[in-house]
């Protein structure tokens, strides 16, 4: 199974949502991405075009990322060989799933919400792939949210958005760790994550502010 399809199925099962589409049908190559987004070319990029009530979506993920995940399956072992590439893949698939899920419900979604949810998805995916234990969670939070560098070519508003998403996701993950991971309340954590996923951005930020 294609690694991105596998991640899509995992996220949809985790959150109990269904997009009704296959991310494999929406993958664009470097040439297609260059035609649609000539300015910035990161290793992962969701491409969205909306006109006349119709939304077109494409997802670019660097082929090297896919090759790494095929060669070093994170489901077998998550380590330094595949950790960074898994994060890129999760980010892209997270963006894709939330964007499509919202579009099918005619629910607006902002770039900040996409980034926030992707940060949460990276944390919970890595946690569940390894072990939902407090020490694992704490190490993941440090690696995901504290040891962070941003691309130098980001515009100021983009950098601010990434920082806001990172900060809020870090606080939410810390709360999940204290409230659910440490006392071994994993089924309740999954229910909380599903509730959080369905909230609009303002309510997600409210949950985080109240929890933190």
Image (cartoon, rainbow, N blue to C red):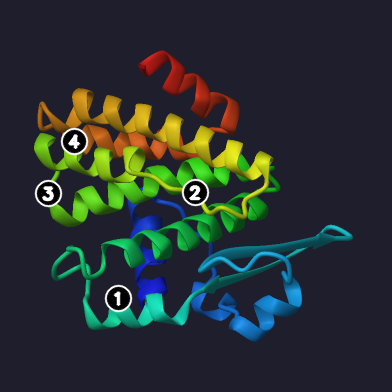
Number of marks: 4
Closer to the eye: label 3 or 1: 1
Query: Measuring 39% from the left and 75% from the top, which residue is drawn there?
Result: 65
Determine whether, in the image, residue 167 is placed left or right of residue 77.
right
Whole-Å distance between the Cαs marked 4 and 1? 24 Å
For the residues labelled 1 and 2, the Cα–Cα distance comes to 23 Å
x then y, percent, for residue 68 = 30, 78
Disc 3 vs disc 1: Cβ atoms closer than 8 Å? Answer: no
Q: Which residue is mark 4?
A: 138
Q: Is residue 109 visible?
A: no
Q: Which residue is mark 1?
A: 69
| Mark toward the start of the polypeptide (4 vs 1) | 1
Quickly name the residue at label 2. Answer: 150
**Percent coordinates x, y for residue 167 in the rendering:** 44, 31
Q: CA distance from mark 2 to mark 3?
A: 28 Å
Please give left or right for residue 190 compared with residue 206 in the image. left
Instruction: Give residue 203's quadrant in the image.
Output: top right
């Amino acid at each position: 199974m294609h690694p991105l399809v596998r991640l899509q199925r995992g996220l949809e099962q985790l959150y109990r949502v269904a997009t009704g589409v296959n991310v494999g049908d929406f993958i664009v190559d470097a040439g297609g991405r260059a035609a649609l987004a000539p300015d910035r070319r990161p290793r992962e990029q969701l491409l969205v075009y909306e006109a006349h009530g119709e939304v077109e979506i494409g997802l670019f993920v660097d082929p090297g990322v896919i090759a790494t995940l095929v060669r070093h399956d994170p489901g077998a072992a998550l380590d330094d060989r595949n950790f960074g590439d898994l994060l890129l893949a999760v980010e892209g698939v997270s963006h894709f799933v939330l964007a499509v899920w919202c579009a099918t419900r005619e629910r607006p979604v902002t770039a900040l919400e996409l980034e926030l949810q992707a940060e949460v998805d990276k944390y919970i995916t890595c946690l569940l792939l390894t072990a939902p234990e407090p020490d694992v969670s704490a190490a993941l939070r440090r690696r995901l949210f504290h040891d962070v560098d941003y691309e130098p070519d980001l515009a100021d508003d983009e950098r601010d958005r990434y920082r806001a998403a990172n900060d809020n996701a870090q606080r939410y993950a810390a709360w999940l760790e204290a409230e659910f991971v440490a006392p071994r309340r994993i089924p309740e954590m999954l229910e909380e994550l599903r509730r959080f996923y369905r909230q609009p951005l303002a309510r997600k930020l409210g949950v985080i502010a109240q929890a933190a």
